[in-house]
Image: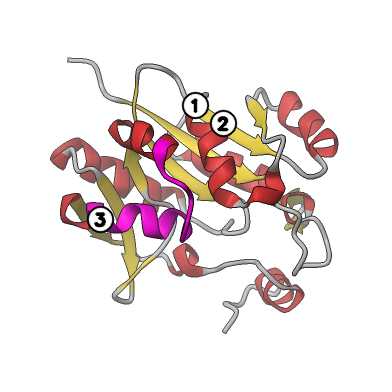
Amino acid sequence: MHPERIAALILAAGRSSRMGGFKPLLDLGGRTVLETLVETYRAAGLGDLLVVLGHRAEEVRPLLDARGVPWVVNDRPERGMFSSIRTGVGRLPADCGAFFLQPADIPLIRPDTLKSLLSARRETRAMIVYPCHGGRRGHPPLISTSLIPAIGAFDGTGGMRSFLSPHRHGAVHVDVDDPGIHIDMDTPEAYAAIRKGGIPS
């Protein structure tokens, strides 16, 4: 029996209005945020990556092309993150069994965390696998592609959290030693703290 094909959907279409700088291209230790995420997923053994672009896509495409990372453009990113999710899931490989949903502004995930989620998916075939640290769920969830038709039909109200909520009984939670699952690089202060090696409050 062949291993299940798992993909990673990286969302990088937003305007980064609260940040003041464009988050996917900000520097993290000599690499951009987006490059950091690509390397993290590859280090975890994930070869199927897809990045959803939107605002300033023309600046990001060369970086992804140089690394052989496929991308798709959300033509209406102002409609919000759920519109990018819809755009992305429609372009995942047809034989993909599950996908990580990775916002670009949560860039400090560890490869071992991804490996733990992959193991849990293999063992349980759960509809959703969430990483947890300190008793709190974080990113990225690993989501069965069987939910893609429902994602397409959902109106987006309340975002992905609202969409996933009715499926909580089919979810598995995996404890990981990774505070990065909660670190959202959403403001200049959070970015400064991350660059100093700290965890934003």
Relative to 146, say whether 124 is above or below: below
1 vs 2, front mark: 1
| SS under mark 3 | helix
Residue 111 lies, in percent from the top left, at: 45, 48
Residue 90 is marked as 1
Q: Residues within 10 Å of mark 1 (few under 14, many from 20)?
A: some
Q: Is residue 189 left or right of residue 7?
A: right
x then y, percent, for residue 58: 84, 34
Q: Which residue is the site of mark 2?
A: 50
Depth order, front residue of 159/64:
159
Vertical side of 191 occupied by 128: above or below:
above
Indicate which disc, 3 or 2, sits on the residue closer to the N terminus: 2
Q: Say whether residue 163 is magenta.
A: yes
Marks 1/3 in contact by CB < 8 Å: the verdict is: no
Q: Is 53 left, or right, of 129 in this rendering?
A: right
Amino acid under disc 3:
Pro
Q: Are marks 1 and 2 in contact (CB under 8 Å)?
A: no
List the single residue furthest toward the bottom: 201
Look at 54% across and 68% down and name the residue there.
183
